[in-house]
Image (tube, rainbow, N blue to C red):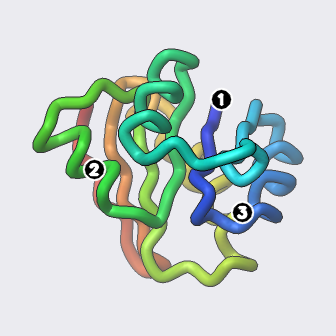
Amino acid sequence: MRVLLDSCVAGLSADAVRGAGHDVVWVGDWPSDPGDEQILRRAADEGRVVVTIDKDFGELAVVRGVLHAGLVRLVGFRAGEQGKAVVRLLAAYETELVAGAIVTAEPWRVRVRPG
């Protein structure tokens, strides 16, 4: 799966997600952060699922109707847990994410808003 990790997601997560066979881009590697809307648009253009801890991406997608290729929002995961959580979520919700779902994951539950 093609994934774009927001800069707020721990950089070590990129290695874990790549290690699971995913094509990963991490915003933290870019020269500057262009802002949430541009990140979401670039991810959509490239067919990448955005992974973030920032709730603003969901607002952009749901309220403002900005196109996206799926979103995963991590809530309450420590930096060291984020990579493993993302790998699990991508595997468990691949079909939904490919269809443009918004997946909000906490350590104890997952909510899926269909795309």
Q: Which residue is mark 3?
A: 83
Measured Cα–Cα span from mark 1 to mark 3: 14 Å
CB-based contact (under 8 Å), mark 1 and mark 2: no
Give the residue type at disc 3.
Answer: Gly
- Please indicate whether residue 57 sits to the left or right of residue 79 in the image: left
Marked residue nearer the N-terminal end (2 or 3): 2
Please give left or right for residue 41 compared with residue 64 in the image: right
Residue receiving disc 2: 58
Q: Nearer the viewer, mark 2 or mark 3?
A: 2
- SS for callout 1: loop
Q: Amino acid at mark 2?
A: Gly
Question: On the rendered image, what quadrant is the N terminus found in?
Answer: top right
Q: Position of residue 97 (x, y in %)?
A: 43, 34
Q: Residue at x 33, y 37 (%)?
A: 101
Front residue of 63 and 106: 63
Residue at image coords 41%, 46%: 36
Q: Which amino acid lies under the numbered mark 1 shown in the image of this protein?
A: Met
Instruction: Name the secondary structure under disc 3.
Output: helix
Q: Quadrant of the C terminus?
A: top left
Q: Position of residue 18 (x, y in %)?
A: 83, 43
> What label sits on residue 99 in the rendered view?
none
Q: Residues within 10 Å of mark 3 (few under 14, many from 20)?
A: many
**Spot occupied by residue 6 in the image (x, y as percentages of width and height):** 57, 52
Q: Residue at x 58, y 48 (%)?
A: 33
Few, some or many residues within 10 Å of mark 2 (<14, 14–19, 20+): many
Please state which of residues 49 and 65 is positioned toward the viewer in this rendering: 65
Residue 48 falls in which quadrant of the image? top right
* Label 1 – label 2 distance at C-alpha: 20 Å
Residue denoted by label 1:
1
